[in-house]
Amino acid sequence: MEPESRFLVGVTGASGVEYARRLIEILGDRTDVIITKDAAAVIEVETGLSAKEFAGRAGMYYRGEDLAAPPASGSHLFRALVVVPCSGTTLAKIASGIADNLVTRAAAVALKEHRLLILVPRETPLSAIALENQLKLARLGVVILPASPGFYGTPRRVADLVDFVVARILDQLGVEHAIGVRWAGPPE
Ligand SMILES: Cc1cc2nc3c(=O)[nH]c(=O)nc-3n(C[C@H](O)[C@H](O)[C@H](O)COP(=O)(O)O)c2cc1C
């Protein structure tokens, strides 16, 4: 697969790593995965897996501390970066131009190279600081896609809620899929 058509998934230490697991499962070897140190801790809590196991069938797995890895450079091509779930800390760093790990550095690269950047924050309630950070990035063209599943498809399982959010990410990436539900008007 050409490097410019590959995806990058950055996993950070917010709750909801299942969204990332499902996205990686669907994108498979079309994506490379970066997992921060704190994300590895949340992955352990929420799934019992190691970071490497979590990366599953992804093409490459990078540790967040690995600032010498290819995604740290603008010369490394990728089509889009999805940070899912995106912690408030990572979002604040991206909004401030801090690039101190491989996820925040890849996000800085995406911004400077005008590549698609999708952030999936998971926090509630939101402080004025978090809202300002999100607004600042949205105005720069970053897609702020909160982990906020809709209930109009009458979800029955947690997996249905996860798929709702992952479907919206895939729509943004322009990847065809058949997961989740699309609103087709009220039931007859
Ligand atoms: C179990 C667990 C759950 C967490 N959930 C969230 C969350 O939902 N949202 C968030 O912004 N931070 C959450 N945090 C805090 C972040 O992990 C923390 O701010 C960390 O510094 C983020 O680092 P990173 O963005 O480099 O991965 C959680 C931490 C733990 C241990």
Image (spheres, grey):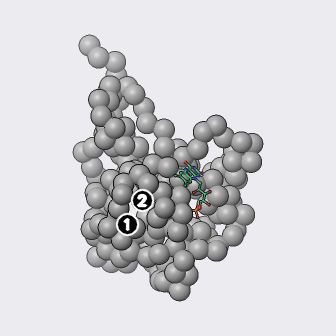
Mark 2 crowd level (few <14, some 14–19, many ≥20, 10 Å Cα): some
Question: What kind of residue is marked 1?
Answer: Ser
In the rendered view, tell whether residue 150 sits above or below residue 47: above
- For the point 65% across and 63% down, the residue is 94
Q: CA distance from mark 2 to mark 1?
A: 6 Å
Left or right? Give the position of 32 relative to 112. Answer: left
- For the point 26% across and 13% down, the residue is 188
Ligand 1 within 8 Å, label 2 CB: no
Q: Secondary structure at mark 1?
A: loop
Mark 1 crowd level (few <14, some 14–19, many ≥20, 10 Å Cα): few
The spot of residue 4 in percent (x, y) is 40, 75
- For the point 59% across and 74% down, the residue is 101
The spot of residue 105 in percent (x, y) is 59, 73
Q: Are marks 2 and 1 in contact (CB under 8 Å)?
A: yes
Q: Which residue is mark 1?
A: 50
In the image, 98 versus 35, the foreground residue is 35
The spot of residue 55 in percent (x, y) is 35, 67
The spot of residue 23 in percent (x, y) is 35, 55
Question: What kind of residue is marked 2?
Answer: Glu
Q: Which residue is mark 2?
A: 44
Q: Looking at the figure, which quarter contains the N terminus?
A: bottom left
